[in-house]
Amino acid sequence: MNAIVLMALIATLGTWLVTALGAATVVFFKSPNPKALNLMLGFASGVMIAASFWSLLQPAIERAEATSNLPAYFVATAGFLFGALFMWGSDKVVTFTQRKLTNTQESPNTRFSRIIMLILSITLHNIPEGLAVGVAFGALQNGTYSTESLMGAITIAIGIGLQNFPEGAAVSVPLRREGFSRKKSFLYGQASGMVEPIAGVIGALLVVYVEAILPYALAFAAGTMILVAVHELIPECQKNQEAQPYFATMGIVLGFAVMMLLDVMLG
C-alpha cells in the first residue's frame, strides 16, 4: 500500500477509535459531562474552522495557481461550495427519511427504525469527514510534502477525532435510554465511525492518483468542515449558554488559536 494512503488509513482509524471512546461513555457513565462535551465541541469547531483555511483552502489556491487552467479563485470557490452543498444534501436526505418514519403509524418496528436513522445520520456525516482527512494526507503525495503540511493533515485528523467523541456518545446514550444493553449501545455507537477509514482511503487514493482533482478536493473538504462546524458543532456547544455564556466560546477561540499557532509556527 502507498505510504501516504497508509498514513490516511491510520489517521482515520484513529478518528474511528475516538468515536468508539465516545460511545464507551455509556459503559462507565449514565450520561457524559455536558460541560466537558461543550468545551470539546467548541475546541473541535475552532480547530476545524482554522484548518479549513490554512490546511485546505490555502493549499488548494496555491495548487490551482500552479497546475490549473482555470482561475484559482474559481477552483477554490467551486470546490468549497460543492463540499458545503454535499453536506447540505446529505442532511436533507436524512431529514426527509426521518419525517417519513415519524409520519408512519406507530408499530413495534418504529422505535428501532428511528434508532437506525440516528445511526445512519451520524454515519452519513462521517463520510465527508473521513474524505477530508484522506484528502489532507493524499495532498502530501503531490509535491506539497513538508512538516507544515504533514502537521496540518494530522491536526485535521485530531480536530475531526475530537468532535467524533461526542458523536459516539450521541448515539450510544440515547440507545441506552431506550432500553438497549450497555454492550449493544456501545457497539451501535462505535459503528457510526466505521465509514471514516473507508472514506479516508478513498479520498487519499483519489488525490494521489488523480492529481488534477487535488485543488478541488482540498476545497471540497474545507466546505464540508465549515458546514459541520458552523451548522452543527457551534450550535450544539452553545446549548448551555445561559449557565456558561463564554465557556464553549472560549473553547472555539482556543481551538482556532492552537491550529493557527501550529500553522504559523511550522510555516
Image (cartoon, helix red, strand yellow):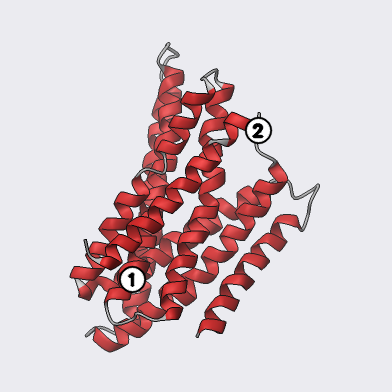
Instruction: Kindly indicate the quadrant of the structure image that contains residue 140.
Output: bottom left
Point out residue 222 in the picture as x, y percentages from the top left corner: 42, 67
Q: How crowded is mark 1: few (under 14 residues within 10 Å), some or many (20 or more)?
A: some
Q: Name the residue under label 2.
A: 31
Q: Residue furthest top?
A: 108
Given the image, on which type of amino acid does mark 2 rest? Ser
Q: Which residue lies furthest to the bottom in this view?
A: 66
Front one among 171 and 73 = 171
Q: Residue furthest left?
A: 209
Q: Mark 1 points at which residue?
A: 78
Viewer can see residue 195: yes
Q: Is mark 2 on a helix, strand or loop?
A: loop
Q: Residue 145 carries which label?
A: none
Given the image, on which type of amino acid does mark 1 rest? Ala
Point out residue 109 in the picture as x, y percentages from the top left corner: 40, 15
Instruction: Kindly indicate the quadrant of the structure image that contains residue 221.
Output: bottom left
Q: How crowded is mark 2: few (under 14 residues within 10 Å), some or many (20 or more)?
A: some
Please report the residue visible at 34 percent of the width from the left and 61 percent of the height from the top: 8
Front one among 102 and 185 = 185
Above or below: residue 87 compared with residue 170: below
Point out residue 110 in the picture as x, y percentages from the top left corner: 43, 18
Of the two numbered discs 2 and 1 in the rendering, the one whose residue sits closer to the viewer? 2
Point out residue 52 in the picture as x, y percentages from the top left corner: 47, 69
Mark-to-mark CA distance, 2 and 1: 41 Å
Left or right relative to 244: residue 257:
left
Please report the residue visible at 39 percent of the width from the left and 28 percent of the height from the top: 100
Q: What element carries label 1?
A: helix
Left or right relative to 81: residue 44:
right
